[in-house]
Image: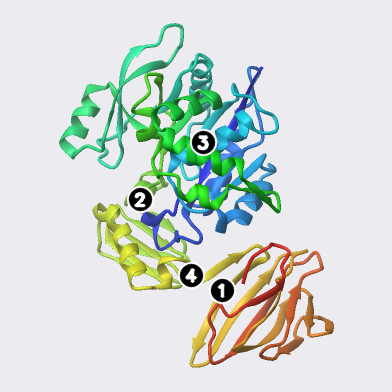
């Protein structure tokens, strides 16, 4: 029986889905298409590939260090503990990321150069699971013969935002697999229309299947600089609370390149499996509108929305009532701290807004008002001169670090659950409606030692209220101040 190792890439920022997706909490961690997050949907899709001919191993994930606890928690919450989670010190595109996974499989503790890798981004939608399963089985057969297989998506419209693959001759004795004749860059509309009519072009999905040894061999042949740097980073890896950390200095020396440019466009072993699987990379609000269930007026509506005389639009409210009147082909997305209003034809320009916000040093480019931490989350309620009010949730069994602040005092009021609070040498348990004061400079810690979620209101006061005013003494999550 063949054993398939899902490799899930979860390093993207999802800036084109701002303001819902932010750098600190990107689209793959959000429930955009179902009750599950996109990462969870990807894990479930991979783990449900098992058949009489195919067994599926626990997933291997590559992600940003800042997302590590969220990624692992989301996998575990749908019943699957990752086989490994590798933390990239910084983004170096897909070729090095996939190489980390290949090295883990081919040269790690259970070294197997013939290990089959199914590489999937964490933020794609696939609606037809049966067709996807069939395409994977076809790709497995080709990969076992040494091919590096990409999945080509049957185009449903003349899309200018995707690269294309032109199929060559059918591979003998491999049903559904073809030689890759050409990789084509994102076309203009006229060329995209020609590709659609031609019938021999498919969208480049960014999903791949090959053996770990085959990928490393081709990477070493065509990009020895990447192979050398990433091998050194992998060999000098460390572990941290069950996460793998490639050596940062070696990883930073690795050139940044995609698997498409580094390997697939150079290798003579590229193959494509054509797949009509209801796929989308959810790369824009327009693509989400295409995927969504729409009403008789062509509107996709989420949340508390009133649409009058409005057609063919994506309307989403996260926190308050939203009314849209007399518009067509618009996207309106409301969050607690930002609102996006645009003609849907300009969906690819959202990234420019994020770039401008980042250049201005605006926090809206980085994170939502609700900020997730390994112990739970907090969100800002109000802020003024020398004060800030937050709501915090500490999950059962979790605790914040033992810490102090040089510039602010804090007042905690429990509104749900029970809190075990350390202030100096004193430890107390607070019930609902009880409170405690933490003076400036006092060592303190908040812990939820119970089975119910703990929520409290935190009132900060002082001359400086930034999140970097934290000195940590003990931290179960091994974070630095």
Q: Residues within 10 Å of mark 3 (few under 14, many from 20)?
A: many
Along the line of sight, which residue is nearer the eye, 454 or 184?
Answer: 184
Decide if residue 242 is on the left or right side of residue 158.
right
Q: Residues within 10 Å of mark 1 (few under 14, many from 20)?
A: some
Q: Is residue 329 visible?
A: no
Q: Give whichever of discs 4 and 3 has the lower sequence position.
A: 3
Q: Which residue is mark 4?
A: 319
Q: Residues within 10 Å of mark 4 (few under 14, many from 20)?
A: few
Frontmost of labels 4 and 3 is 3
User: Looking at the picture, how far across and down is residue 456, in whole percent?
Assistant: 68, 78
Give me the residue at 41% from left, 57% from top: 301
Q: Which residue is mark 1?
A: 379
CB atoms of marks 2 and 3 within 8 Å: no
User: Looking at the picture, how far across and down is residue 405, in whole percent?
Assistant: 64, 84
Residue extending farthest to the left is 190
Image height check: is 207 above or below 338? above
Q: CA distance from mark 4 to mark 1?
A: 13 Å
């Amino acid at each position: 029986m063949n054993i398939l190792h899902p490799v899930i890439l979860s390093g993207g920022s999802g800036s084109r889905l701002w303001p819902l997706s932010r750098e600190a909490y990107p689209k793959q961690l959000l429930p955009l298409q179902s009750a599950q997050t996109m990462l969870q949907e990807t894990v479930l899709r991979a783990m449900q590939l098992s058949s009489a001919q195919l067994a599926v191993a626990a997933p291997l994930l590559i992600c940003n260090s800042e997302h590590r606890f969220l990624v692992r928690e989301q996998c575990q919450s749908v019943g699957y503990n990752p086989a490994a989670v590798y933390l990239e010190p910084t983004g170096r595109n897909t070729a090095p990321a996939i190489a980390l996974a290949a090295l883990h499989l081919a040269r790690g503790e259970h070294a197997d150069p013939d290990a089959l890798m199914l590489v999937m981004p964490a933020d794609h939608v696939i609606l037809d699971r049966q067709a996807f399963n069939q395409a994977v089985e076809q790709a497995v057969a080709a990969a076992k013969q040494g091919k590096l297989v990409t999945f080509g998506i049957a185009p449903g419209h003349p899309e200018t935002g995707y690269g294309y693959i032109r199929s060559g001759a059918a591979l003998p004795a491999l049903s559904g697999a073809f030689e890759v004749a050409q990789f084509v860059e994102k076309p203009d509309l006229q060329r995209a229309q020609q590709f659609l009519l031609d019938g021999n072009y498919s969208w480049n999905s960014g999903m791949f299947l090959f053996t770990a040894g085959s990928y490393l061999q081709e990477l070493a042949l065509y990009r020895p600089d990447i192979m050398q740097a990433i091998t050194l980073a992998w060999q000098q890896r460390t572990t941290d609370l069950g996460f793998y950390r490639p050596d940062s200095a070696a990883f930073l020396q690795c050139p940044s390149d995609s698997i498409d440019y580094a390997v697939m466009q150079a290798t003579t072993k590229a193959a494509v499996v054509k797949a009509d699987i209801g796929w989308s990379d959810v790369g824009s609000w327009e693509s989400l509108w295409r995927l969504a269930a729409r009403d008789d007026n062509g509107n996709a509506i989420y949340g508390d929305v009133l649409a009058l005389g409005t057609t063919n639009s994506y309307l989403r409210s996260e926190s308050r009532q939203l009314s849209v009147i007399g518009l067509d082909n618009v996207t309106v997305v409301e969050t607690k701290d930002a609102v996006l209003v645009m003609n849907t034809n300009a969906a690819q320009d959202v990234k420019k807004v994020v770039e401008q916000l980042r250049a201005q040093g605006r926090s809206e480019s980085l994170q939502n008002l609700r900020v997730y931490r390994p112990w739970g989350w907090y969100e800002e309620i109000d802020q003024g001169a020398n004060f800030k009010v937050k709501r915090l949730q500490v999950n059962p069994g979790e605790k914040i670090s033992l810490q102090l602040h040089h510039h602010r005092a804090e007042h905690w009021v429990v509104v749900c659950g029970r809190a075990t609070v350390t202030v100096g040498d004193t430890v107390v348990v607070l019930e609902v409606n009880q409170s405690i004061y933490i003076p400036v400079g006092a060592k303190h810690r908040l812990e939820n030692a119970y089975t119910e979620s703990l929520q409290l209101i935190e009132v900060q006061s002082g001359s400086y209220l930034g999140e970097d005013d934290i000195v940590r003494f003990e931290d179960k999550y091994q974070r630095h101040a």
